[in-house]
């Protein structure tokens, strides 16, 4: 990540008594740097397929009831936080942390 870019995720700690639960929202991010967006098809630029669009708002209450949440800030087309970091870093959309191409139709 370059200086000035936001972190790849937002961690919200529980308010009050914490519960032993972490809610992960790895496909909720929508940020796409211009240098990556310019490589997208017009359809992908207009609509980031495979995005969990409203999960952060839907789960906004979780820290208030003691649940830790972690939510992606960047689109899964930039970095997929739901991938195994011990697996491939770059390559297949369904396995790599950084996909070589957007999701196949």
Image (cartoon, grey):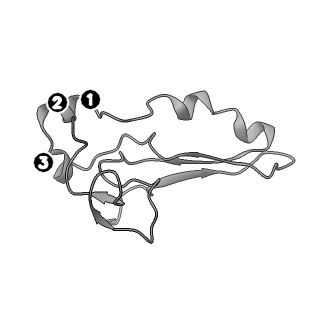
Give the percent coordinates (x, y) of residue 58: 59, 27
Give the percent coordinates (x, y) of residue 53: 44, 30
Which residue is situated farthest in the bottom direction here?
86
| Residue 36 - label | none
Left or right of 104, for residue 66? right
Residue shown at the point (37%, 40%) measured from the top left: 30
Question: Which part of the image, by quadrant, shows the N terminus?
Answer: bottom left
**3 and 50: which is toward the camera:** 50
Left or right of 13, for residue 9? left
**62 and 2: which is toward the camera:** 62
Residue shown at the point (34%, 44%) measured from the top left: 31
**77 and 29: which is toward the camera:** 77
On the image, which quarter does residue 63 sit in?
Answer: top right
Residues tagged 2 and 1 counted as in contact (Cβ below 8 A): yes
Residue that badge 2 annotates: 43
Residue that badge 1 annotates: 47
Q: SS for tag 3? A: loop
Q: SS for tag 2? A: helix
Residues tagged 3 and 1 counted as in contact (Cβ below 8 A): no
Task: Say which label, 3 or 1, has the lower sequence index.
Answer: 3
Question: Which part of the image, by quadrant, shows the C terminus?
Answer: top left
On the image, which quarter does residue 90 sit in?
Answer: bottom left
How many residues crowd mark 2 within 10 Å: few (<14), some (14–19), many (20+)?
few
Residue that badge 3 annotates: 39
How many residues crowd mark 1 within 10 Å: few (<14), some (14–19), many (20+)?
few
Q: CA distance from mark 2 to mark 1?
A: 6 Å
Residue shown at the point (44%, 47%) measured from the top left: 73
């Amino acid at each position: 990540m370059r200086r000035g870019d936001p972190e790849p995720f937002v961690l919200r700690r529980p308010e009050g008594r914490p519960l032993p639960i972490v809610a992960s929202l790895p496909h909720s991010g929508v940020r796409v740097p211009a240098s990556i967006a310019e490589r997208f098809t017009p359809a992908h630029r207009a609509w980031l397929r495979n995005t969990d669009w409203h999960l952060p708002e839907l789960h906004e209450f979780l820290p208030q009831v003691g649940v830790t949440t972690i939510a992606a800030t960047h689109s899964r087309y930039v970095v997929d936080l739901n991938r195994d970091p011990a697996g491939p870093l770059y390559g297949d959309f369904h396995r790599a942390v950084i996909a070589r191409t957007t999701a196949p139709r």
